[in-house]
Amino acid sequence: MSELRDYRQPWWHRLTGVLGEPSRRWRAMDDRERFQAGIVLRAVLVGVLVYATSWPLALLVAVIFAVQYAQPYIPEGYAWLRRAVIPTIVLLVAVLYPFYNGRLPDMRWLGAFPDVNTAVIMGVYVIMAIGLNIVVGYAGLLDLGYVAFYAMGAYTCAWFASVQFAKHHVQFGAVGVASTTPGIHISIWLLVLLAGILTAIIGIVIGLPTLRLRGDYLAIVTLGFGEILPQVANNGDSLGGFNLTNGPNGITPIDAPGFFGVSFQSGSGTFFTGPRLFFWFVLLLVMITVFCSLRLRDSRLGRAWIAIREDETAAAAMGVPLMRTKTWAYATGAFFGGVAGAYFASFKSSTFPNDFNFNISAFILSMVILGGMGNVWGVIFGAAFLAYLNQEGLANIGHSINQHLGTHLDVPLYQFGIYGAIIVLTMLIRPEGLIPSARRRAEFHEGVSDTPLYDTQQ
Amino acid sequence: MASEARREHISWVRGVRRAGAIPAVGFSLVALLLVWLGVNLVQTPSDFASVALEGLTLGLVYGLIALGYSLVYGILELINFAHGDVFMLGSWISLSVAAHKIGLTQSTSGFKVVWGLALTLLAAMAFCGILNVTIERLAYRPLRNAPRLAPLITAIGMSFILQDVGLNRLGPAPVSVPNILPTSAVFSIGGNEYRWSSLIVALTTFPILFLLIWLVQKTRQGKAMRATAQDQEAAAMMGINVNRTISFTFLIAGALAGVAGLLYALYSTNIRYDQGFQLGLIAFTAAVLGGIGNLPGAVLGAILIGLIQQFNEGLSWHAPSSQWTQSIVFAILILILVFRPEGLLGERTPEGG
């Protein structure tokens, strides 16, 4: 390839001085200079956050940066502190969120901080994005039909915790459902697990014939499944006369989860309100997901995934069973999609076929890409941020823009164009994402490619 | 090259699956399809004939889009997701030029329709071609050395951006296009009319297809395209400007999308901001069915898909009807990729599956 021009540098690097010069300088620095420049850059970021979102978010970010810089000074004997401090701070801030979110000042451009219901949705999307990250980020299989798993989870929950099958009368561990209510009502906690397992099985069934396909063909096939499943849900009100999914009207209401006779739908008293309970338990699910994801990444299986992502042929030569490893990635990703779908359906108390179109797949994909493929923390950030934008942020931003500039833009209408722009800009400017994993960054910048472009056509 | 050894290795690992039950399942599926068509033909011959003609017409429009996918895939191995949305913007520009700038309406007649539509066609081709080249320049070229999925992801992002441009221009509701072409019947088969508008749409595509085949097979530029598709590095050594050739390919693909945009607007008399996504996927399926990268294959696949869609929606005996069209098309896509990834006319490569 040396005879051809080198395209490793993005084209805008030629605009020296505007965008090219800073990154060129950054590359020329040694470690000490980078350390100093890092302090300045982080201070600038905090300053921008203070301007754009007022103090609370900026304070959190400043504390995290301070801890990062303080970590080398922690004595050797307290090494566990290094790993535990930042997660503990973030966890505390998150768990206590329902108590103080009403008292926070409004953000300048983004409006009020998200309310607890929005935070639940953000949590659900975080689970889904971590699940997709296993498929896309770890194993490097582009899945454009992830929404199919989400839909499977949601419908599993809906079938077994609603009056959809009114001919049957089964109740098991359901909270807040009268014993005379017809239909199947099973405890949501069991269903969340069941939905995950069922979806993982579906993932294996879809994966077995298709995972042998090459990367972009696999993407298209998953897209096909992602389009077929919602259509089945949409037409499923008379599959040979049997009403499976109630068609476009969807299945509603769906039972809420509960504990000790307290249903999350109504909550109990002013302390354990419904949204707060939903929020705390989605946090728990997120923590379990993060734990599983990190442990999986470091396991033998996870290392096999990363090996396949980096070089399929070399991995196969080293004895990694390709099909089995890929299928496991698919099944694991599907499992988390199903869990998130089931919990979300129970939270919304409804499920409609229109919730599951291709846009949602691309939306979750853009979370993974924006945050940083392969890095759980980046993906959490990307998912929480984009889900917030989707729920409240874009409307607030549109409101701010219209107020300041006197325009009449309907910003939320163009949400998918905005996500598209985020995808394109991320891929062009920082393909490894905002908070990248070190390995992934190296892959993008050293031009490691699974199939070189110039010798694939013979 | 080094990849040769790797390919042999892969085909050795995966070579087992061709034998045994899989071809048998594939053939029995095709046989079932033929039986279903045969029964329909015997039961309602006139319906069958008119539905087949409509399917052919629709298939030719799909073919123009499918060619765009196939051209780009052939040269860059990139599934240009944004292509369907370029086609949608082609429909939009055709509508705004024909109906708003030139002022063609249902009652316009004779000579003005001819030159008006010719002008619209040129405008749509130029607009979509330049748009496609710009997209390639801005979004795909910087990623030419990146991992292979990077440009595909970028293409999805571009598709969303273009779709929202269409949303801004057309609004969320379908926009109706005036019946500029005469809607009287050319002939009718058992009460089912075949209209002049459909015939004109079908007839317009043929010269364009022949022009394209001539361009790719006979001209110097076409030779450069084929060379670049085969081996970019060797083509560059032979003095071919690879970047310009790729840009030219995108120009041609975009121009074809522009033609398809105009013809689809005339044919369906209804355009929508998200038609690009739906029809783009259908056309992509057609390209895969015919063998992606293979130009006659793209047209053949598109005609087959058009026929299948119309048979599904128009026949009476055990047809699943239009609410299942999309599922059927995607099921075909999946089956093709699983059973015969090289398509009907494509060459079998070890990596094709």
Image: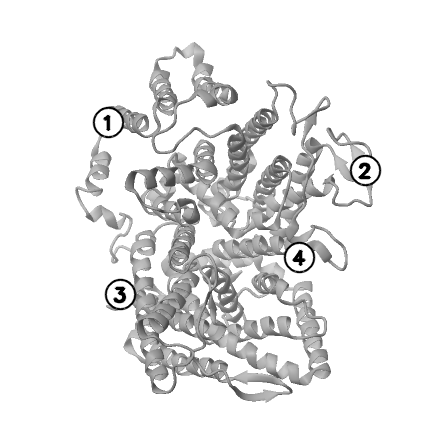
Q: Nearer the viewer, residue A389 or A172?
A: A389
Q: How far is disc 1 from disc 2 in space, using C-alphas?
A: 64 Å
Q: How far is disc 1 from disc 3 in space, using C-alphas?
A: 41 Å
Do the residues indicated by labels 4 and 3 lie within the same chain of the protein?
no
- Classify B284 as above or below B149: below
Neighbourhood count class around disc 4 (C-alpha, 10 Å): few under 14, some 14–19, many 20 upward: some
For label 3, the SS is: helix
Residue matched to label 2: A170
Name which residue type carries label 1. Answer: Ala
Do the residues indicated by labels 2 and 3 lie within the same chain of the protein?
no
**Residue drawn 75% across the image and 42% down it:** A163
The x and y percentages for residue B80 are: 41, 60
Colour mode? Answer: one colour
Residue matched to label 1: A37
Q: Answer with left or right where residue B18 lies relative to residue B58.
A: right
**Residue drawn 42% across the image and 29% down it:** A112
Q: Is residue B13 visible?
A: no
The x and y percentages for residue B77 are: 41, 61
Name which residue type carries label 2. Answer: Val
For label 2, the SS is: strand
Q: How far is disc 4 from disc 3 in space, using C-alphas?
A: 48 Å
The mark lying in front, picked from 1 and 2, is: 2
Pinpoint the chain carrying mark 1. Answer: A
- Classify B29 as above or below A318: below
Q: Which mark is residue A235?
A: 4
